[in-house]
Image: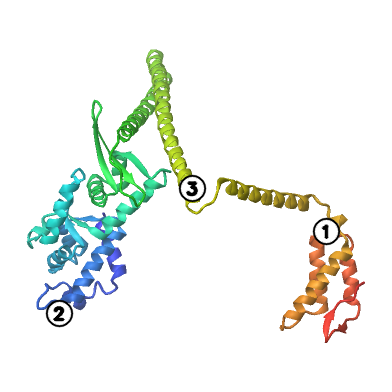
Amino acid sequence: MDSDSVKEFIRREVPDWDDEVVATARFKAFSGQRSDWEVKFQFWRDLILKVSRRFGVFIIDPVQVKKTWFDRGGMTPLCIDHVLLLMHSEGDVVLISELESPVSGRLSRLLRTVRSLVAQPSVKPGEILENELVIVPLLKEKAADVVRLLSEGHWTSTCVVTLNKFRDLCNGSNEASAVLSHLSGSGKAHKISINRGELIEGVKVSFSESALTSISTLDCDILHLLRTTEKLQNQLEVMDQRFEMSRKSALASLKSGHKKVALRHARELKLTTESREKCTSLLNRVEEVLNTIADSESTKMVSEAIKTGARVMKDIKISPDEVHDYLEEIEETIQSQKEVEKALESAPYQDIDDENIEEEFMKLEMELESESSEVRPSTSETADSLTEMFSELKLGNTKQALEEQATEPVRTKDGGKKILEAA
């Protein structure tokens, strides 16, 4: 996080940041009753949140906040320690050491919650600057964003990902631990650890409002397959780099006339290519297994939806035959609509009777004139609009007929309503 960017952002957010008089008052330590410095506290609290949100961080170093973010030519705010202490006591920040362990059980989390309700953990003024702080509102926002990103790539109500991928989504190990702690505490995630020749760690995340199910054998198998996929992809990247190096070395050897060396590099290229093909084939097989599992889970969800629908139909006393009849009726309506659209598209416009269409337009115009109290368009405008409509319908000689009508006199009928005489 670049300090110059932070200071530039602060100057944009606080126009009077460089005002010496105002800054001197802001940077003083709090004294007196809270009502005397409440406004200053809210200023610093909101500014810390704004800077953190702008630069995408929710774990902050108090020393960096005090001496880097808010430094003004060697002058730092004397009240920041007090501000951070109050933010901690009011639940805006927590010490990173106070976060729950993602692997702790429900009983442990319950006891921790009870202890926090009975007695708020006290932090001494000196301690607040010695520990990294987690900004709780931004932690919640980050956790929700991670869940949203994961849900976009899965159709099921839960998913399993490797810990490496989870860390990438959270932008770091510390951030991932904090997010996982929050999600575990709210019952939205479980950490998975298995030993399949190596320690494999992952996370199971829920996308629904219901409680997250416990870790199953299938979850562990999926995690193993996902970890295998990661390892194969890493191997492919190494092979690609080795292939490129061998190719460049072979070309350089040929240019310099060292044919034997070039031949050796060519053999390395062939071996790398064969190894890459085998690795790619294995990766494809693993991905096929994962896709099969995903499809089966989607099929299970569809089956459960069908069962739910059947139960609902039974509750509201709708028989399957009635549903079938409704579906057939809808299908017939859709098919009829398609036939009408098809007929309209394929029907030649030349077969339409010009006089009948003109008569319908005249009736519509008369109805509009009778319902509207606004100024009526002139005869020439009406004729032009009808001409344009007919031209779009590609009717033969209609434009000429309308132009002749426009030149004929207008007569009044039924209380002054204006209509065009038929040609």
Circle 2 residue: 36
Task: Pick the quarter of the image with the N terminus.
Answer: bottom left
- In the rendered image, residue 287, in percent from the top left (x then y), is placed at 41, 31
Q: Residues within 10 Å of mark 1 (few under 14, many from 20)?
A: some
Amino acid type of the residue that numbered disc 3 sits on in the rendered structure: Gly
Name which residue lies at 83% across and 86% down. 416
- In the rendered image, residue 181, in percent from the top left (x then y), is placed at 22, 49
Above or below 176: residue 49: below
Name which residue lies at 37% across and 50% down. 148
Circle 3 residue: 309
**Along the line of sight, the residue nearer the viewer: 305 or 127:** 305
Amino acid type of the residue that numbered disc 2 sits on in the rendered structure: Asp
Which sits earlier in the primary sequence, circle 2 or circle 1? 2
Which sits earlier in the primary sequence, circle 1 or circle 3? 3
Name which residue lies at 12% across and 67% down. 82
- In the rendered image, residue 119, in percent from the top left (x then y), is placed at 10, 61
The single residue placed furthest to the top in the displayed view is 260
The single residue placed furthest to the bottom in the displayed view is 415
Amino acid type of the residue that numbered disc 1 sits on in the rendered structure: Lys
Q: Does residue 110 appear left or right of residue 8 in this picture? A: left
**Which of the numbered marks, if any, corresponds to residue 394?**
1
Q: Secondary structure at mark 2?
A: helix
Q: Does residue 133 appear left or right of residue 268 in this picture? A: left
Cα distance in 3D space between marks 2 and 1: 81 Å
